[in-house]
């Protein structure tokens, strides 16, 4: 158990819909990262937040957005969903913004039908 | 960003030592080298991190030569449960940290 929690575990929705994925980092960790992993794309970095502020952006689509709240939990919002958005979405946390020592959550499996 | 190159896959047998080498020719002075392990449908798990020479923990050893252009993850006496994908990462703190996971190395341990 990494100490990072993600909800929900599974999510099934339809194209065009909007969903919100939630992540609670390890206690004390200020940095949160979001990743997408699909079968044909590997693990793709989406975005990083540090203490409520966006710190780095990867291959995140404009239809996706994220935020980190004052209590340090984070949400990833996915809108206008397409079939290709079906993937595992992982959240990770670390205690600072410059480390590769990230602790990953169990992931949310999103299925878009 | 320092790019990494690893073998796509490796096979081994239970009880053997496995060495996975990662090339990172453009590693920067402040970069650290980190390895993660990922089982199917689970998030990657931190294994080990180092800057130079050798680092050992209860799970693995990491060997980094003086020029730091490569690193080798060593797993002693692997078991079937070590079958996983292993990722090598090189950290580049640039005021905004983008973590780049490559394709990783698929290790398959046979009985």
Image: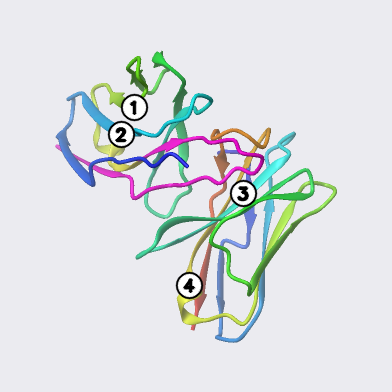
Residue numbers of the magenta segment: B87-111
Q: Which chain does the numbered disc 3 sit on?
A: A
Q: Which residue is mark 4?
A: A86
Q: Which residue is mark 3?
A: A33
Q: Secondary structure at mark 4?
A: loop
Query: Mark 3 vs mark 4: which is more N-terminal?
Result: 3
Q: Nearer the viewer, residue B69 or B104?
A: B69
Q: Which chain does the numbered disc 4 sit on?
A: A
Q: Which chain does the numbered disc 2 sit on?
A: B
Q: Which residue is mark 2?
A: B23
The crowding category of the residue bearing disc 1, from other C-alpha atoms within 10 Å (few below 14, some 14 to 19, many at least 20), is: some
State whether the magenta stretch is mostly helix, strand or loop.
loop
Which residue ends up furthest to the right in the rendered image?
A70
Q: Are marks 3 and 4 in contact (CB under 8 Å)?
A: no
Residues at marks 3 and 4 on the same chain: yes
Q: Which chain does the numbered disc 1 sit on?
A: B
- Point out residue B86 in the picture as x, y percentages from the top left corner: 34, 40
Q: Secondary structure at mark 1?
A: loop
Query: Mark 2 vs mark 1: which is more N-terminal?
Result: 2
Q: Label 1 vs label 3: CA separation?
A: 27 Å
- Point out residue A54 in the picture as x, y percentages from the top left corner: 72, 52
A51 w.r.t. A83: above or below: above
- Who's the residue at 43% across and 39% down the image? B2
């Amino acid at each position: 158990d990494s100490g990072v929690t993600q909800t929900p575990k599974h999510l099934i929705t339809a194209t065009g819909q909007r969903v919100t994925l939630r992540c609670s980092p390890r206690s004390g960790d200020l940095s949160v990262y979001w990743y997408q992993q699909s079968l044909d794309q590997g693990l793709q970095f989406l975005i990083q937040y540090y203490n409520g502020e966006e710190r780095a952006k990867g291959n995140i689509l404009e239809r996706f957005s994220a935020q980190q709240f004052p209590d340090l939990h984070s949400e990833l919002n996915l809108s206008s969903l397409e079939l290709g958005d079906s993937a595992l979405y992982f959240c990770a946390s670390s205690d600072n913004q410059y480390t590769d020592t990230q602790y990953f959550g169990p992931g949310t499996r999103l299925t878009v039908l | 960003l320092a790019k990494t190159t690893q073998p796509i896959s490796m096979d081994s047998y239970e009880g053997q030592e496995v060495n996975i080498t990662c090339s990172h020719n453009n590693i920067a002075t402040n970069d650290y080298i980190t390895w993660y392990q990922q089982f199917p449908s689970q998030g990657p798990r931190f294994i080990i991190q180092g800057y130079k020479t050798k680092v050992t923990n209860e799970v693995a050893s990491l060997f980094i030569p003086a020029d730091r252009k490569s690193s080798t993850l060593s797993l002693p006496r692997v078991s079937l449960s070590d079958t996983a994908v292993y990722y090598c990462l090189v950290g580049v703190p640039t005021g905004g940290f983008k973590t780049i996971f490559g394709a990783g190395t698929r290790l398959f341990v046979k009985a």
